[in-house]
Image (spheres, rainbow, N blue to C red):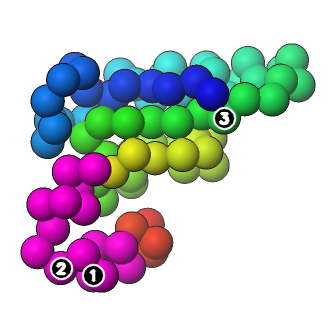
Amino acid sequence: LVLFMSVEPGKGGQKFMANSIKKIEKAFDYRKKFKLNYLIEVDGGINLGSLEKIPKEKVDLFVMGSYFTKSNDLNKSIKEVKNV
C-alpha cells in the first residue's frame, strides 16, 4: 500500500493539494511498468471537487473522513460520490 497524503497531516477538513496528482500518476505508472502489486490510497481533502480532478482509474482507495462526517445528509453524500 502506498498512501498519498494530499493535505498537511494532522488536521481534518483541509483543502486538497493539487500537486498530489502528479505523485499519484507517477506511482501508478511505476506500478504498471514494473508489474508490481500494491494499492494506491489518497487521504486528505477528498470531496466532490477534488474527485473530479483526481484520475480515479489510478487510485484504489480514497479516504473521505471530513466529507462524510460533516455532511448534513450522509445518504445523499454517498450517492453523489458514487456518481463522480
For image coordinates 39% across by 46% down, the residue present is: 63
Using the numbered discs, state the Cα–Cα distance from disc 2 to disc 3 in whole angstroms. 30 Å
Please state the extent of the stretch shown in magenta in the rendering: 65-80
For label 2, the residue is 73
For label 1, the residue is 76
For image coordinates 25% across by 26% down, the residue present is: 7
Q: Position of residue 8 (x, y in %)?
A: 22, 20
For label 3, the residue is 39
21 horizontally vs 26: left or right: left
Q: Position of residue 62 (x, y in %)?
A: 46, 47
Using the numbered discs, state the Cα–Cα distance from disc 2 to disc 1 in whole angstroms. 5 Å
Q: Residues within 10 Å of mark 3 (few under 14, many from 20)?
A: some
Extreme right residue here? 35
The kind of residue tagged 3 is Leu
The kind of residue tagged 2 is Asp
Secondary structure of the residue carrying numbered label 3: loop
The image's mark for residue 57 is: none
Secondary structure of the residue carrying numbered label 2: loop
Q: Vertically, is 23 above or below 79? A: above
Contact between marks 1 and 3 (CB within 8 A): the answer is no
Q: Vertically, is 28 above or below 56? A: above
**Image quarter of residue 54:** top left
Contact between marks 2 and 1 (CB within 8 A): the answer is yes
Main SS, magenta region, reads helix
Using the numbered discs, state the Cα–Cα distance from disc 1 to disc 3 in whole angstroms. 28 Å
Q: Vertically, is 74 above or below 54? A: below
Q: Vertically, is 78 above or below 29? A: below
Give yes or no for residue 37 being in the magenta stretch.
no
Q: Residues within 10 Å of mark 2 (few under 14, many from 20)?
A: few
